[in-house]
Amino acid sequence: MSDAISWNGLLFLSGRAAVDPATGKLRATTFGEQLRIVLDDTLEVLATAGSGPEHVLRVECWLRDRADFAEWNGAYVGTFPPPRPARTTLVADFPIEGLLVELQLTASVPA
């Protein structure tokens, strides 16, 4: 699976979760730890592609538990500068036991 695909100045990131791609095992157990891993991984993929949080256009977030929304919202505000990207947040179940959050982003890549 590709970390991201670039097309016509846009960067489409694959869903990011706190899962080791080699083993399929969780890299953390708490929501805060998983969220930090996901955001760090996302920022690394953006940087590698020549983009950054200031170029993110859309963020899609899936939470396992709606009780984690406030923590997610704080991290969103702290990670993406104004004007913040368009956002959707859903509560969903995941195929991996213990997975608590997943993000998917679309960003621009400046010329």
Image (cartoon, rainbow, N blue to C red):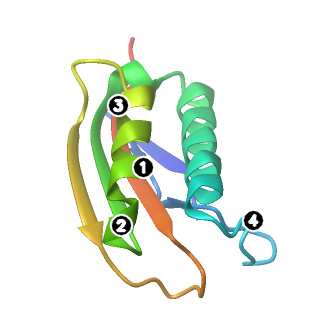
Q: Residue at x 21, y 54 (%)?
A: 88
The amino acid at mark 4 is: Arg
Q: Give SS at disc 3.
A: helix
**Label 3 vs label 2: CA separation?**
17 Å
From the image, tell me which residue sits under label 3. Answer: 77
Q: Residue at x 26, y 18 (%)?
A: 82
| Sequence-first tag of 1 and 4 | 4
For label 2, count other residues whose C-alpha is less than 10 Å away and answer few (under 14), some (14-19) or many (20+). few
Q: Residue furthest top?
A: 111
- Quarter of the image where one finds residue 27: bottom right
The image position of residue 26, as x and y in percent, is: 71, 73
Secondary element type, mark 1 = helix
- Residue 59 at x, y percent in the picture: 31, 46
First in sequence, mark 3 or 2: give its number. 2
**Which amino acid is tagged 2?**
Ala
Q: Residue tagged by mark 2?
A: 67
Vertical comparison of 95 with 7: above or below = below
Q: Identify the image quadrant of residue 62.
A: bottom left
Disc 4: which residue: 27
Decide if residue 95 is on the left or right side of residue 62. right
Which residue position is annotated with label 1?
A: 71
Q: What residue is drawn where x is 25% and y is 27%?
A: 84
Query: Image check: 96 left or right of 27?
Result: left
Q: Earlier in the sequence, mark 1 or mark 3?
A: 1
The answer to whether mark 4 and mark 3 are in CB contact below 8 A is no
The nearer-to-camera label among 1 and 4 is 1
Disc number lying in front (4 or 3)? 3
Depth check: give the residue in front, 77 or 51: 77
Viewer-proximal residue, 21 or 6?
21
Q: Secondary structure at mark 2?
A: helix
Callout 1–callout 3 Cβ contact below 8 Å:
no
